[in-house]
Amino acid sequence: MADSKQEFSTYKGRPLVRCGDEIYYGSMEEPYVIRMQIKSKKEVGGAEIADKVTVQLMATDPYLSPRKQLVKSSEKNGLFLAMDIADIWLERALAKK
């Protein structure tokens, strides 16, 4: 019987899942996860890349209201800067647990 656990791409050892213009970084089994939303894109060298990205640190507790799940939010220029701050925020939040 095949293992039902799905393998995801990872970044710095944590799952990285993309669905359309939303990217989730971290595990839903941990107390916090990062949600990144690509707000705008631009074309560079024939490829479309993320321009404006909203980064949100969110609690994964399903009993919290959506408003209380949002811990921290920021908008960054480009996916590289968004991933950089996402990793820092997630590391700090999980270190406090």
Image: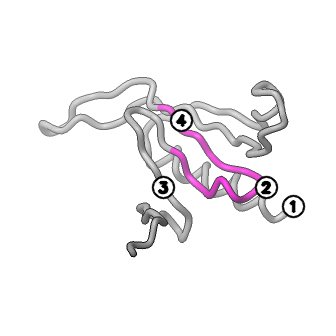
Q: Earlier in the sequence, mark 3 or mark 4?
A: 3
Q: Earlier in the sequence, mark 4 or mark 2?
A: 4
- Amino acid on which the number 1 mark rests in the picture: Lys
The residue shown at (12%, 36%) is 46
Query: Is residue 30 located in the magenta-colored stretch of the structure?
Result: yes
- The quadrant of the image that shows the C terminus is bottom right
Q: Residues within 10 Å of mark 4 (few under 14, many from 20)?
A: some
* Distance between the alpha carbons at the discs numbered 3 and 4: 18 Å
Mark 3 — residue?
Answer: 16
Q: Marks 2 and 4: in contact by CB < 8 Å? A: no
Picture disc at residue 76: 4
SS at mark 3? Answer: strand
- Amino acid on which the number 2 mark rests in the picture: Ala
Query: Is residue 66 located in the magenta-colored stretch of the structure?
Result: no
Residue 80 at x, y = what percent?
45, 49
Q: Nearer the viewer, residue 38 or 51?
A: 38
Q: Is residue 34 left or right of residue 78?
A: right
Q: Nearer the viewer, mark 4 or mark 2?
A: 2
Q: Is residue 21 left or right of residue 14?
A: left
- Amino acid on which the number 4 mark rests in the picture: Lys
Residue 70 in the image: above or below residue 86? above
What residue range appears in magenta? 24-37
The residue shown at (74%, 45%) is 60
SS at mark 4? Answer: strand
SS at mark 2? Answer: helix
Q: Residues within 10 Å of mark 3 (few under 14, many from 20)?
A: some
Q: Nearer the viewer, mark 3 or mark 4?
A: 3
Q: Earlier in the sequence, mark 3 or mark 1?
A: 3
Mark 2 — residue?
Answer: 93
